[in-house]
Image: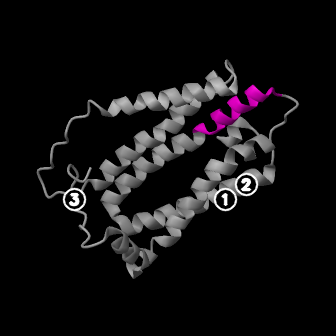
Amino acid sequence: MSQCANNQNVGLFNSVFWTFVAATLVVGNICGAFVINKVNASTFFLIATSVCLASVFVYIPLATPKKADTDTYKCAEPEGNQVSETWKLAKSTRMMVFMPLLAQSGVIMAFRSALLMQLFAFTMDKTAMTPSTQNSQILLACLGLGFGQVAGTLINGQLRDKIGTRQVVYVNMLQHVCAYVLILRYLSVASFSLTFAL
């Protein structure tokens, strides 16, 4: 991306890349929600693993990117040991502005990976559904997460190009606050509903 993007459109390039990454949540959850009702869990995981392995071959026919005509987006090349240079950057005053955002991103990723699906399962009425139906409903509920990430990456990328990185950091912090408010609202209700979970 650094070979193709320039300082005016690097946000767009990043947002398109991360949109494809986030779209896996949408496609994967839709496929999983319907497949998991037809097969047992071990077969489902074998199918999902096979799809992941097959997706590697998508990268084989990719062409070499064309360089941008205007000034290419440059990242400063570190001098000396890259590990020590990264550590110096992490301790710098400039990076301290981003540390709360990075910490919040880590917390949200951990929550999404470890607790979100358990939260949905915990708040479901288990007497009304079979285990495979519960799993299907949880995967469908995670579509909101996928669509939110796709929309967020596209919007944040465009915002970065228009208003700059520093202002987008504040927008991201506001987005995190909104996410926490929605999670607390869901916990206060403590009853699974597909429309509310979305």
- Eyeballing the image, is 40 above or below 102? above
- The kind of secondary structure element at disc 2 is helix
**Amino acid type indicated by mark 1:** Val
Q: Identify the image quadrant of residue 110.
A: bottom right
The magenta segment is 129-143
Q: Badge 2 is on which residue?
A: 185
| Residue at left offset 62%, top offset 50% | 112
> Residue 45's quadrant in the figure?
top right
- From the image, state whether disc 3 or disc 2 is nearer to you: 3
- How far across and down, in percent of the image, does residue 171 sit? 47, 63
Q: Is residue 102 left or right of residue 4?
A: right
Q: Pointer 3: what residue? A: 73
Element carrying mark 1: helix
Which badge, 3 or 2, comes first in the chain's sequence?
3
The residue lying at 25 percent from left, 63 percent from top is 75
10 Å neighbourhood of mark 1: few (<14), some, or many (≥20)? few
Residue placed at 26% from the left, 53% from the top?
9
Q: Position of residue 88 (x, y in %)?
A: 38, 77
Image position, residue 187 (x, y; %):
77, 53
Which of the 4 image quadrants contains residue 78? bottom left
Instruction: Provide the residue designation for mark 1.
Output: 181
Which quadrant holds the C terminus? top right
